[in-house]
Image (spheres, helix red, strand yellow):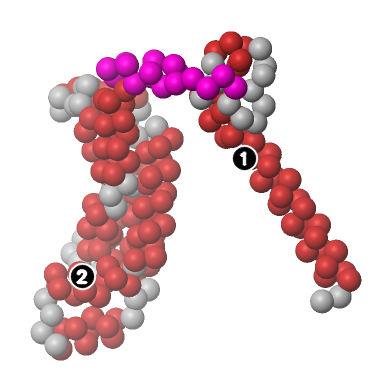
């Protein structure tokens, strides 16, 4: 490596090290403060490591009966809410050119991306469906993301049709073709959609 290359790598590594410290220090401070006494935190004695080791903060948090409900809801929303199965089930038939009225159904889905009833009609609908104070209210309204569905449909459309012809010649049904050919081929896209859905749920 030339001197210019070495100088470049040293500069980049130094910048990354500084950025890592900037990001890591607040996390370390929070952890250290959680194991320190309230007096030490108020006095500003906590810098890197815990001062006057104490578990009072954790005792106060876990003594709250609602903490279990909070973690239960978090796990439920994260695991169930990130499921992309309904998006894939919707995208698969819309990607097939032989589906009747495919353009009409695609228009209905796309229409919802630009126009919606608003807050009050949405609340009225959720209320009539008896989803108020129900954990499913965080899952069902966003079970199918139209944008994510369009991404999955577009990727499915670009799969070689020869794969499906070969599967049909071997006697595979539409369901088998979908499970054993389509879904494995779009696994990278499904992973991206999974991450996007997880981000949306965690932001809520």
Q: Nearer the viewer, residue 37 or 26?
A: 37
Compared across the picture, whether 3 is left or right of 107 comes to right
Compared across the picture, whether 59 is left or right of 23 comes to left
Disc tally is 2
Residue 77: which quarter of the image? top left
Residue 19: which quarter of the image? top right
Instruction: Compare marks 1 and 2 and give the one earlier in the sequence.
Output: 1
Q: Reply yes or no: does residue 53 show up in magenta.
A: yes
Q: Quadrant of the C terminus?
A: top left
Q: Residue at x 61, y 15 (%)?
A: 40
How busy is the neighbourhood of tag 2: few (under 14 within 10 Å), some, or many (20 plus)? some
The reply to whether callout 1 and callout 2 are in contact (CB within 8 Å) is: no
Looking at the image, the residue that sits furthest to the front is 52
Q: Residue at x 31, y 30 (%)?
A: 71
Which dot marks residue 174? none
Compared across the picture, whether 36 is left or right of 72 comes to right
Q: Reply yes or no: does residue 56 show up in magenta.
A: yes
Q: Is residue 92 above or below residue 105?
A: below
How busy is the neighbourhood of tag 1: few (under 14 within 10 Å), some, or many (20 plus)? few
The x and y percentages for residue 51 are: 60, 22
* Mark 1 residue element: helix
Tell me which segment is drawn in magenta.
Answer: 51-66
> Residue under circle 2?
178
> Residue under circle 1?
24
Q: Nearer the viewer, residue 25 or 16?
A: 25
The x and y percentages for residue 82 are: 32, 46
The x and y percentages for residue 137 are: 24, 31
Name the front one of labels 1 and 2. 1
Is residue 148 in view from this perspective?
no
* Mark 2 residue element: helix
């Amino acid at each position: 490596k030339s001197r210019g290359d070495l100088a470049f790598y040293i500069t980049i590594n130094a910048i990354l090290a500084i950025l890592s410290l900037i990001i890591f220090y607040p996390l370390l401070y929070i952890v250290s403060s959680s194991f320190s006494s309230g007096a030490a935190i108020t006095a500003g004695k906590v810098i890197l490591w815990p001062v006057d080791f104490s578990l009072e903060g954790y005792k106060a948090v876990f003594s709250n009966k609602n903490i279990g409900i909070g973690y239960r809801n978090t796990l439920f929303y994260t695991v169930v809410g990130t499921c992309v199965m309904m998006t894939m089930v919707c995208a698969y038939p819309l990607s097939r050119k032989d589906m009747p009225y495919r353009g009409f159904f695609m228009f209905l889905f796309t229409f919802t991306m630009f126009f919606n009833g608003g807050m009050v009609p949405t609340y009225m609908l959720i209320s009539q469906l008896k989803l108020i104070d129900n954990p499913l209210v965080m899952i069902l309204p966003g079970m199918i993301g139209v944008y994510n569905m369009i991404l999955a449909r577009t990727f499915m459309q670009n799969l070689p049709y020869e794969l499906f012809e070969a599967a049909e010649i071997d006697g595979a049904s539409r369901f088998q073709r979908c499970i054993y050919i389509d879904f494995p081929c779009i696994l990278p896209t499904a992973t991206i959609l999974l991450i996007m859905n997880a981000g949306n749920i965690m932001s809520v």
